[in-house]
Amino acid sequence: MSFVRQWTLRITSFALTWLYTLYRAHPAVWRLMARNYRPFMGRFARLHAWMTCQFAAIDVPAYADFLRRHHWRFRWFDLSSYPLTDKQSYVKAYPEEQRCWGGEIEVAGSVVDESSGSSGQPFNWIRGRRELRSVHKNLAGYATLVFPSRRRFVINAYSMGAWATGTNTGIAMSKIAMVKNTGPDLRKIADTLRYFGPGFEYIVTAYPPFLKHLRDLLDAEDFPWADYRINGLVGGEGMTEALRDYLEERFVKVRSGYGASDLTIGVAGETDFSVWVRRRLRTDAALRAALLGKDEHRLPMIFQYNPLETYLETTADNEVVCTINSTAVLNPKIRYNIGDEGRIHSFPDVLAAIEDPAVRAQAEAAWAVDRMRLPLLFLFGRKDSTISYMGANIYPQDVEYGLYQDNPLAHLLQGFCLELRERADLESRPVVNLQLRDGVTLDPADRAELARRCREGVLSHLAAVSRDFAESLAEDPSAGELAVEVHDFDTGPFAGSQSKIKNVYLVTGATR
């Protein structure tokens, strides 16, 4: 690369970084940007993503070698000219220090996070002090927008230790709230709520299933929910509207964030508007076809995200690709394909897809709560998180809907997992394994009733959301032979699972 080109890029990057420093200065500035975002900022963000890629080509040894191996050629302002990276082709292929700026790890002030290993081998991810400051300010800015209050009390129920979400959430929330880092300890959280009383606006941060366990425990103890204002901020895995409905019978509001250990914990977050759109998609076939395609019946998570921080694209196969727009990231993420399936729409395009004026008014009323004009990410989750059965893909989220929606026995459940089990006649059938809550005991008749209700709920929901599954049922009624097995707490396929940080929804089947 010529000397003139290098210094032109460096000077321009310095100016962009200075501008970014201004809007990261305080959560209030972040809120101002989110509420005044316009489409031209997306073009600016794409330019910055291109510059981030180009700087990595110059100053990150692993990325420079990666480009050489892909026979890359420089092209001005063409982000698509840079090949995609991912965990297999890039992270595993190069040593940690070679993937850092200048080929060196910044030691002082850096923190090592570890992914949960839900996709296989756990990984270590190093974050420098400048990157962490940016992450904390972004998360704090989002939280103040979604949970406006002058007396926030955050109970951080994420696991502590080497996992990115727990410690970073505690630090970020301390900028805007009083924080107690309890970890996932139900007893400690219940005692904390009672000790400090109802004079605060509580936010419990946790994985989605943990909030269900908390609600069930407090219900069992006749907790005075009406005297308190308790919200939930969840992340780490998908959440169905059935589970949200169940939680919001007690919690004031439950919102989800989207992130990943190999990217950052603050990629995107739910707002009142994004939740309204998601709930509308359950019944509005025209809107679903306009935003997702006429043959799409799954219900994605929907988030709003800031392209100035994390520039998102999608591939021809609808996989989400992310470039983190900051040279503060110690180990830059350049057009990184995390393996999640999704769609991207601008805020004006989503509004324009709502043709009915009365429905548009409802959407605008939902938007007026948070007033964020950021683009929306429609996220289906990992492409490999399914069981294929009778030509249909069964997603854990769809099973969760069937288990929790309109099920009066949902409070008995700790969790579930799926398997595709080969029977003695060599036919494979899906099995939904249910785990009872700790301390719950059921006689055989009650177990059978729980299994029956859950089986009917799952089959009904699958038939409603999956055309392939519905057609399989019509052509071959035996396709509905869905087995549901009820297990006591920490037994069967759930034995030893209580030590895991995240729920595991797929297990290897066995021949029986």
Image (cartoon, rainbow, N blue to C red):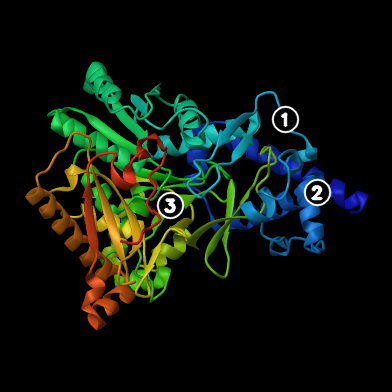
Looking at the image, can residue 269 be seen? yes
Residue 100 lies in quadrant: top right
Can you tell which of label 3 and label 2 is closer to the viewer? 3
Left or right: residue 363 versus residue 216 is right
Estimate how packed mark 2 is, as few (under 14), some (14 to 19) or many (20 or more) residues with alpha carbons within 10 Å.
some
Residue marked by disc 2? 9
Residue marked by disc 1? 106
Looking at the image, can residue 252 be seen? no
| Mark 3 and mark 2: Cα distance apart in space | 32 Å
Give the x, y percent position of residue 204.
Answer: 33, 32
Q: Which SS class for mark 1?
A: loop
The disc, 1 or 3, on the residue closer to the chain's N-terminal end is 1
Give the x, y percent position of residue 156.
Answer: 39, 29
Nearest the eye: 94 or 428? 428
Residue marked by disc 3? 303
Rendered residue at 65%/32% (across/down): 128
| Mark 1 and mark 2: Cα distance apart in space | 23 Å
In this view, the residue farthest toward the top is 195
- Can you say whether 467 is above or below 454 in the image? below
